[in-house]
């Protein structure tokens, strides 16, 4: 099951075939929901056979603080978690969540950031797997420990200064719900609003009602409306093509750097490289001197 920058998704049918092969991929169940219930409860109730549960709060993020609610995990902690889950250097990995890949994208991004190339996201997640009539298990997996070596720095990241610069001179996407971007509501963080110059680009618009990603042509049209022009072939080593075509620098953020990884994944599907502001809004507002904007994005009609 070779993977590359060109093919970060895997369908249920593809995974069902790969899971039955001798070189089956490691399966990581990363279900998590803001405010609960805990993802481990869902895992214990039923998961893909052989999948290992990985916890977002303790294994895919570091302790909350000035770097935001879900900063990067310590390299050694992440490496140990992946080894305990059976991840091997050069071995295939498939990550999944309940349906829409908002958490799975974070795991995908972290593995790629730490140098693991052969990682894919199950399109549609557990819901698509069950919907296809495929079996689930309640048995807790006991994988053979892997030898994964974390080599951080393989994907672009932004700090607060970078995010401000991308908002000024490039395209900074805010992946949260529009009402949070506009500052009309803020259910999680202490301050409402958005980074000045950022554009509202809700990650929920990357997927269809069933949680699978929209076709590439629809994603291209969506991001083109925000000034992001992906190469027409959509995938592959198209990131360099996008830069060669004069595409402005693109970055993404959300509340805590989880959902923004979904935006990066969606852009990857159309061949556009994007940097992740891991601290995101929760990290931005940790410094009260940083400016805050409210209201609709430029060009939006009232209401």
Image: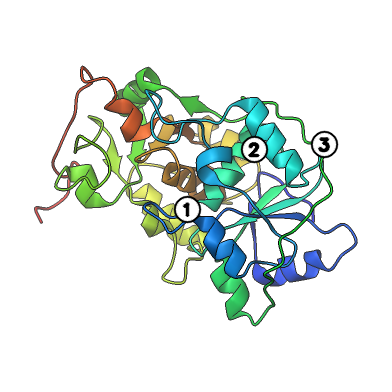
Question: Which residue is at the front of the view, 23 or 218?
Answer: 23
Quarter in which the C terminus is drawn: bottom left
Cα separation, mark 1 vs mark 2, equals 16 Å
Examine the rendering and report whether any part of residue 262 can be seen. Answer: yes
Name the spot of residue 256 as percent of width and height, x first: 39, 38
Looking at marks 1 and 3 on the same chain, the residue that comes earlier in the sequence is marked by: 1
Question: Which residue is at the front of the view, 209 or 94?
Answer: 94
Tell me the element at label 2.
Answer: helix
Quarter of image, res 23: bottom right
Name the spot of residue 178 as percent of width and height, x first: 24, 51
Q: Which mark is residue 147?
A: 3
Tell me the element at label 3.
Answer: loop
**Residue at x 14% of width, y 47% of height:** 184
Q: Please state if 138 lies on the left or on the right of 186 as rendered.
A: right
Quarter in which the N terminus is drawn: bottom right
**Residue at x 78% of width, y 55% of height:** 142
**Residue at x 87% of width, y 65% of height:** 21
Question: Which residue is at the front of the view, 255 or 63?
Answer: 63
Looking at the picture, does residue 142 appear above or below residue 188? below
Q: Which mark is residue 102?
A: 1
Looking at the picture, does residue 30 appear above or below residue 271? below
Pointer 1 local density, CA inside 10 Å: few below 14, some 14–19, many at least 20: many
Tell me the element at label 1.
Answer: loop
**What residue did someone put label 2 on?**
112
Examine the rendering and report whether any part of residue 231 can be seen. Answer: no
Question: Which residue is at the front of the view, 17 or 206?
Answer: 17
């Amino acid at each position: 099951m070779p993977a590359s920058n060109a093919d970060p998704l895997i369908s249920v049918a593809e995974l069902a075939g790969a899971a039955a092969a001798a070189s089956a991929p490691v399966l990581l169940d990363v279900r998590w929901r803001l405010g609960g219930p805990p993802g481990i409860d869902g895992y214990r109730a039923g998961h893909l056979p052989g999948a290992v549960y990985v916890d977002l709060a303790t294994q895919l993020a570091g302790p909350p603080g000035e770097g935001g609610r879900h900063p990067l995990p310590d390299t050694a902690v992440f490496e140990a978690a992946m080894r305990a889950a059976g991840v091997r250097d050069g071995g295939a990995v498939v990550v999944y969540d309940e349906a829409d890949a908002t958490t799975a994208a974070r795991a995908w991004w972290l593995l790629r950031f730490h140098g693991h190339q052969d990682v894919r996201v199950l399109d549609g997640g557990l819901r698509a797997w069950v919907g296809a009539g495929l079996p689930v298990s309640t048995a807790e997996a006991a994988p053979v420990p892997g030898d994964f070596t974390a080599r951080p720095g393989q994907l672009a990241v932004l700090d607060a200064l970078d995010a401000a610069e991308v908002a000024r001179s490039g395209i900074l996407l805010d992946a949260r719900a529009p009402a949070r971007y506009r500052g009309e509501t803020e259910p999680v963080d202490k301050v409402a609003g958005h980074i000045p110059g950022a554009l509202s680009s809700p990650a929920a618009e990357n997927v269809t009602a069933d949680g699978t990603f929209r076709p590439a042509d629809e994603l291209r049209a969506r991001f083109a409306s925000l000034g992001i022009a992906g190469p027409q072939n959509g995938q592959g080593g198209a990131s360099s093509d996008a830069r060669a075509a004069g595409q402005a620098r693109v970055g993404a953020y959300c509340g805590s750097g989880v959902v923004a990884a979904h935006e990066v994944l969606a852009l990857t599907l159309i061949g556009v490289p994007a940097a992740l502001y891991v601290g995101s809004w929760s990290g931005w507002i940790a410094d009260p001197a940083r400016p805050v904007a409210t209201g609709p994005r430029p060009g939006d009609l009232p209401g």
